[in-house]
Image (spheres, rainbow, N blue to C red):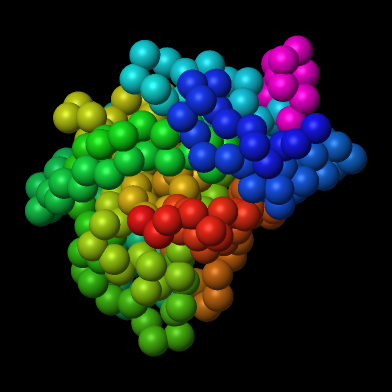
Amino acid sequence: MSTDERTDPDGRGAPLGRRLVLGMLGLGGAGLVAAPYLQRGFETVTRKDPTGLTGLLPNGGGFRYYSVASSVPERGPENYRLTVGGLVRHSTTYTLDDLRRLPQTRVVRDVQCVTGWRVPGTPFEGVRLSVLLDAAGVRPEATAIRFDCFDGTYTESLALPQARRDDVLVALRMQDQPLAHGHGGPVRLYVAPMYFYKSAKWLSGITLTEKVEPGYWEHLGYDVDAWVGRSNGRDDAPTV
Ligand SMILES: Nc1nc2c(c(=O)[nH]1)N[C@H]1C(S)=C(S)[C@@H](COP(=O)(O)O)O[C@H]1N2
Ligand SMILES: [Mo]
């Protein structure tokens, strides 16, 4: 079987990289640590796709809803909090209204999941991550960020220069609407130039760290530097 040529169910996705596929299949033995999503993924997919990578059905807008946690509490204006801490001068906690009052930036790019599906021209709006970093005062010994989520499970990471790009948002809106719970609302990270797994949903913590702490999928074989078209075995694809 040639897994390299496989595309998403719509036939629009880029080919999967061999390293990614091998990385995922390598989970066989370690599957128990890999949380419900992967196990469900494998069960769904064995019927028509033995790689276990393309089984989730698209919703109307072309997105799949992904969660490695089996259930996630809803949070809204009353109980949502985002803490910026770790190696900063002033640890800060924001409410949803605090974030809404800060300057909002709009970024419109293609969303690209590493498993192949893509949603063209998707608007995201929110506060530039760099604005929150500047407000907190990053200490010189910090080189990276760990992102925590209120699903209690998922984590992500960025190196500081990546985090300071002006197309990296703490997003409050997606597709011209408040971020729905299923898409990680009320607040998710949005890292436009990287595969969508970097865009942590249900964001609750931004922690400045001494070194990169690889995130959930990165422990399972995905690249930490997840540039679209230049990572995860797609190094020959056009640069975005
Ligand atoms: N907290 C959390 N964030 C997450 C994930 C997750 O499982 N949990 N999945 C990632 C992956 S692999 C993708 S493709 C996108 C999916 O976002 P969507 O559900 O809004 O389509 O979220 C990313 N962020
Ligand atoms: Mo993904």
Kindly identify the residue that appears in the image at 37 percent across and 74 percent down: 161
Asked whether, in this view, residue 105 is left or right of residue 134, the answer is: left
Question: What's drawn in magenta, residue-wise?
Answer: 40-51
Q: Is residue 44 magenta?
A: yes
Query: Which residue occupies the foreground of this view, 239 or 151?
Result: 239
Q: Is residue 177 above or below residue 209?
A: above
Q: Quadrant of the C terminus?
A: bottom left
Asked whether, in this view, residue 131 is left or right of residue 13, the answer is: left
Q: Is residue 134 above or below residue 75?
A: below
Query: Which residue occupies the foreground of this view, 199 or 119?
Result: 119
Note whether residue 39 is visible: no
Query: Which residue occupies the foreground of this view, 154 or 81?
Result: 154
Residue 175: where, in percent of width, then height?
23, 29
Asked whether, in this view, residue 179 is left or right of residue 12, the answer is: left
Quarter of the figure with residue 53: top right
Asked whether, in this view, residue 17 is left or right of residue 120, the answer is: right
Query: Which residue occupies the foreground of this view, 189 or 136?
Result: 189
Kindly identify the residue that appears in the image at 72 percent across and 22 percent down: 49
In this rendering, the count of numbered labels is 0
Q: Is residue 195 magenta?
A: no
Residue 143: where, in percent of width, then height?
46, 78
Residue 152: where, in percent of width, then height?
56, 40
Kindly identify the residue that appears in the image at 26 percent across and 35 percent down: 122
Kindly identify the residue that appears in the image at 40 percent across and 59 percent down: 239
Residue 14: where, in percent of width, then height?
51, 40
Q: Is residue 143 above or below residue 170?
A: below
Q: Quadrant of the N terminus?
A: top right
